[in-house]
């Protein structure tokens, strides 16, 4: 498998993803909650975690940009 094939394969949604996503959306809706708000919070948590793990590098790049 070539690197480009692996890259495409990693971006593909897993088998059955759409069915499970629809079910989860229905569950959230039944509870009066927003699936998309929850998903947004998950995305924010991932970005925050990444930033905290890489804060030294990010600070260094910011200082370079200022100079």
Image: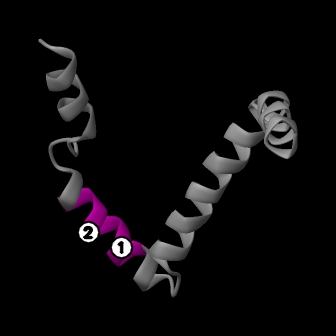
Q: Is residue 10 left or right of residue 60?
A: left
Q: Residue at x 18, y 24 (%)?
A: 4
Tell me the residue that label 2 is attached to: 22
The quadrant holding residue 28 is bottom left
Query: Looking at the image, do the residues carrying marks 1 and 2 touch, with CB atoms under 8 Å apart?
Result: yes
Q: Residue at x 64, y 58 (%)?
A: 44
Q: Where does residue 2 sit, x and y in percent of width and height?
A: 14, 14
Compared to residue 40, the image places residue 59 above or below, namely above
| Front residue of this view, candidates 28 and 44 | 44
* Magenta stretch encompasses residue 24: yes
Tag 2 secondary structure: helix
Residue at the outermost bottom position: 32
Look at the image and give the residue range highlighted in magenta: 19-27
The quadrant holding residue 25 is bottom left
| Front residue of this view, candidates 44 and 55 | 55
Q: Residue at x 85, y 37 (%)?
A: 59
Tell me the residue that label 1 is attached to: 25
Tag 1 secondary structure: helix
């Amino acid at each position: 498998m070539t690197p480009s094939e692996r890259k495409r394969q990693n971006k593909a949604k897993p088998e059955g993803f759409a069915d499970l996503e629809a079910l989860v959306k229905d569950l959230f809706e039944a509870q009066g909650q927003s699936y998309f708000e929850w998903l947004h919070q998950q995305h924010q948590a991932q970005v925050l975690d990444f930033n905290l793990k890489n804060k030294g590098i990010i600070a260094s790049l910011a200082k370079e940009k200022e100079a």
